[in-house]
Image: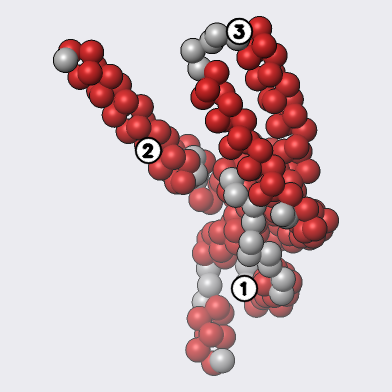
Amino acid sequence: MGYNYLKFEKLTKDDFLRNLATNGFNIGFGAKKNFASYDIINKLPSWVGFISLGVGVIQMAYEHMRFNKELSILMIIVGIAILYADSFKSKLEEYEIEGIRLTKIFNRLRDMYYIVKADSNFLYNNYENDYQALLNEYYIHTISKQVFMSQWHAHFKFFYEMQIDWVDEQLKFKFFKDKFPNSLKAFFLILAVIFLTIYISNGLCSNI
């Protein structure tokens, strides 16, 4: 306990501002991830219904279209996605409540950030109790199981819908490094390899 007290007592204003921003990112992104799961569960059936209607119209209008088989396979995959999302239906309200809870903590961290930034006589001890209380409130409850692809949707909601200027001021986010999900990068890379393989295979077959 004595070691921690001395360590935090020497925490500079700049260090504390960065800590606030780092935790602000974790908490704010967590909030948006819960809202993303909520959106996917709540809105996916509507999205799928619209897509299914569009695909059905296309298949009827162009009965002998080259990609009819592929479109049918796509609709099967989409149907599986609906069944997957439906398995989370019982947690819908829980995701919304958790998203609201984390957003409130995020906003209180933001308020503390601007108060600290304006404090010309900064001492960490003046903020320690309130800061630790916010972190304890954050850690007291988490929902670890999120809906597939909520990470991608959460990136959009956090970086393009949320007011995060104060977080960006400290962490200086880069587009490709931070705002573009790593799993989405891997997905596009795999997709590119698949298309390249098909293209090369078709080219070789046509030359035989």
Q: Is residue 152 above or below residue 117?
A: above
Residue 159 position in % (x across, y down): 61, 41
Give the CA distance from mark 2 to mark 1.
48 Å
Query: Residue under circle 2?
Result: 190
Left or right of residue 164: residue 189: left
Find residue 124 and name its label. 1
Write the residue at 78% across / 43% down.
Answer: 42
Q: Earlier in the sequence, mark 2 or mark 3?
A: 3
Real-space Cα distance between discs 2 and 3? Answer: 30 Å
- Looking at the picture, the colour scheme in use is secondary structure
Which mark is in front, 2 or 1? 2
Q: CA distance from mark 1 to mark 3?
A: 69 Å
Q: In the structure shown, which secondary structural element does the residue marked by tag 2 occupy?
A: helix
**Pointers 2 and 1 in contact (C-beta within 8 Å):** no
Q: In this view, which residue lies farthest toward the front?
A: 64
> Which disc is residue 3 wearing?
none
Q: Is the Cβ of the residue at disc 1 closer than 8 Å to that at disc 3?
A: no
Q: Residue at x 65, y 20 (%)?
A: 55
Q: Which mark is residue 62?
A: 3
Describe the element under mark 3 as helix, strand or loop: loop
Q: Nearer the viewer, residue 77 or 110?
A: 77
Other-residue count near label 2 (Cα within 10 Å), few / some / many at <14 / 14–19 / ≥20: few
